[in-house]
Amino acid sequence: MLKFARNKLTSVYRKGEDRLAVHGVLEDDIYGLEIDLDLSLSGLEVLSIQGCWNRMENAECPRALPFLQEAVGFRIDQDFTQKVQKIVGRKSCRHFADLILECGEAARDAARLIREKDLEARGPEIEVEDYFGKAGGSGKNESPTNLSVKERVVEHGREASRGMVIDLHVHSSPASPCSSNPVERLIEEARAIGLDGICLTDHNHVWDPTEVEGLRQKHGFLILGGNEITTDQGDILVLGLEEDIQGVIKLEELRERVLKAGAFMIAAHPFRGFLTFGIGYLGLTPEKARERPVFQGVDAVEVLNSRVSEKENRFAAQVAEGLGLPLTGGSDAHRAGEVGLYATRFADPIRNERDLVEALKNGRFSPVVFREQ
Amino acid sequence: MEAWVEILVKAPDLEIVGVRGQVRRSGEGDRADIAPDLQQVLGARVGPGIKKIVRGLIADGPLVETLAILLDECCNGVILSFTRDVLVLAPQDRAGEKAFFSNMVRANPRLYNSCAALSADSPLMADLNLEKC
């Protein structure tokens, strides 16, 4: 039985010496949309864009159309996919973004064919740069920040009475491109709401221990360096591992490295988006979910995360409790206003990453809803 | 370029348990063996983050981008087939539609501000009190 079908069609026309016109159509069982793009042939830059809906999800989908203009000026280069998904996909509509990317691919291929034909017509006396384009672009290196460190003692006055409450899952900009706030703003917010500390878990980003220590001293606040690593079994928060892991790693390989380093692994938001269609619909039960390989390869499970539904958090807790795995909480903040929505309360005092890993291994912690307290 | 990819996904976990495909025609050589790259995605689950995982798992090579696009589209199809089953239940009248999408976003907070129709200032979200999002 066919449950779903999607067709996409893109056509590229050469409109002039330096102009391509691209028409894209997407038709599936839910959506119907079209776009017309004009691009420069030489720079593959979006010069204009128009879109229309033929069939849409709800009455407000037309609000997406004006935001398509955000794509004007984009170049089809290595950042094109990310920019289209992040800007057009979020402000406008991800299905339009999807179709723009399809059109971009087609335009790139068309430009390559045109260039090849032009070269054939010009004969063999061609410079390498004519063919591949001139080197350059946006790859400039930013100079490292000069860190001014002031000596200040980090105080945790309340730790004796209520333990330490630390948000174990925080993203900062620019280390996480999806985050909108620099670390200073996050620290300011965390302090204002009464957290005892935050753990920076930027995506596949290793914080320089010297820089983290500098932040601790500068702000007189507990800042910890962690990492959120993408594996084939989903995202894993890793604490205590200073190795820079890029791309996607197999879970078992990460486990080996973590064990070797004496670090700690937490399955981050393990059911994010999985219950969108209802547990009953797919028949996913906690018992079945416990068989997932990810739970054999972690030390704890994040069961309070602000970017998933309460149902998904509850489900994660049911699964983890059934397996006897410890539970943690973290906001997964991408904006300052989200810091501390959820956190983890530790019984032991924590002053640095080593204390954190030790406290996690001791198991004397629990997830907490923090902002509502 | 002419290529196809098929994935077999096991419910309820949406784990990719089978994958196959073929490049029938391409500028990189018609006989490109894509099977080893495709096998890398076995065991991954269709769901949020799958695009990043797929791109990360398949090796570098001239056809990687094409394979990633085809695999992405397969995963999209799986997800949208479920989405369609939910969306057909949406009422057609204005008030009913508003309540339906409000509830949908409340149950799936990641949808909030995920597009223009579900943005904070959209009429569909007017009754939604979602402090956390």
Image: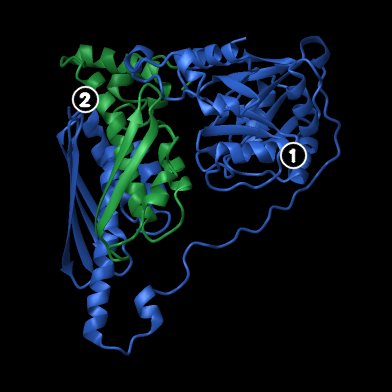
Chain colours: A blue, B green
Image mark 2: chain:
A
Asked whether residue B22 appears in the rendered view, the answer is: yes
Q: Which mark is residue A235?
A: none
Subunit of label 1: A
Residue, disc 1: A261
Question: At which x and y percent is residue B132?
Answer: 49, 19
The quarter of the image holding the C terminus of chain A is top right
Which residue sits at x=37%, y=50%? Answer: B35
- Identify which amino acid the numbered label 2 is placed on: Asn
Provide the residue designation for mark 2.
Answer: A58
- Classify mark 2: residues with Cα within 10 Å, few (<14), some (14-19) or many (20+): some
In this view of the protein, which residue sits in the foreground, B102 or B18?
B18
In the rendered image, residue A209, in percent from the top left (x then y), is placed at 76, 43
* Whole-number angstrom distance, CA of label 1 to CA of label 2: 51 Å
In this picture, residue B25 sits left or right of residue A158: left
**On the rendered image, what quadrant is the N terminus of chain A found in?**
top left
Q: Tag 1: residue type?
A: Ala
Instruction: Give A283 or B98, whichever is nearer the viewer.
Output: A283
Give x and y (percent) for residue B84. Answer: 23, 25
Say which element carries label 2.
loop
Disc 1 crowd, CA 10 A, few/some/many (<14, 14-19, 20+): few
Q: Identify the residue at image location x=57%, y=45%.
A: A174
Residue A45 picture quarter = bottom left
